């Protein structure tokens, strides 16, 4: 624009689209999903990825008419390539204990920087224990089926 002499080099264009804040422009479903993920991380995993003010803004903000189109933020856990590659399930899509265990482990790995040192040992022990418990239950279930077949 400067080279075409349509704008001086020191002129700042004044643009006001009256969009509001970031949270005003994020679609309701995206805000609710982000709030659910953060609530789950805080409650079950003891991980906080945002401050309390931002967390409350997610919960309380009412959307406006002008919305962000496309991805409103980049979240590795919402990228379909990673979801499929790591078998990750978002909180709202988890149906089985195995999905929860695996997805929790992936969440914990992605957010290790937000985990307190004292929680890290417990985090790994809990995850390893849960995986071992699920595997043992699956083996016992298979053995019980074999025993019932042999008894017939």
Image (cartoon, grey):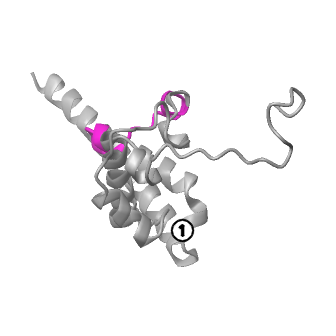
| Residue at which label 1 appears | 115
Q: How many marks on residues?
A: 1
Tell me if residue 97 can be seen.
yes
Residue 112 rendering spot, x and y as whole percentages: 58, 61
Q: In terms of image quadrants, where is residue 92?
A: top left
Q: Residue furthest bottom?
A: 118
Per the image, label 1 sits on a secondary structure element best described as loop
The residue closer to the viewer here, 70 or 84, is 70
Residue 141 versus residue 62: which sits nearer the camera? 62
Quadrant in which the C terminus appears = top left
Residue at image location 50% in from the left, 47% down from the top:
106
Residue 63 appears left or right of 86:
left
Disc 1: CA contacts within 10 A as few (<14), some (14-19) or many (>=20)? some
Residue at 53%, 70% in the rendered image: 121
Point 83% across, 49% down: residue:
10
Residue 67, quarter of the rendered image:
top left
- Nearer to us in this view, 120 or 46: 46
Q: Quadrant of the N terminus?
A: top right
In the rendered image of this protein, does residue 90 appear above or below residue 147?
Answer: below
Please report the bounds of the magenta region as a residue range. Answer: 82-97
Residue 134 magenta-drawn?
A: no
- 58 above or below 97? below
Which residue is at a point 41% across and 58% down the rendered structure image? 129
In the image, is residue 94 part of the stretch drawn in magenta?
A: yes
């Amino acid at each position: 624009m400067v080279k075409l002499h349509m704008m001086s080099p020191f002129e700042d264009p004044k643009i006001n689209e009256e969009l509001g804040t970031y949270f005003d422009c994020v679609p309701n479903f995206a805000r609710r999903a982000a709030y659910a993920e953060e609530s789950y991380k805080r409650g079950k995993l003891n991980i906080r990825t945002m401050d309390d003010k931002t967390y409350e803004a997610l919960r309380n903000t009412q959307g406006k008419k002008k919305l962000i189109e496309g991805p409103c933020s980049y979240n590795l856990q919402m990228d379909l390539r990673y979801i499929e590659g790591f078998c990750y399930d978002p909180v709202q899509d988890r149906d089985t204990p195995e999905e929860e265990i695996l997805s929790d482990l992936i969440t914990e790995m992605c957010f290790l920087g937000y985990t307190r040192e004292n929680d890290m040992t417990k985090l790994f022990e809990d995850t390893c224990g849960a995986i071992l418990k699920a595997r043992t239950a699956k083996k016992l279930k298979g053995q019980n089926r074999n025993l019932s077949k042999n008894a017939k």
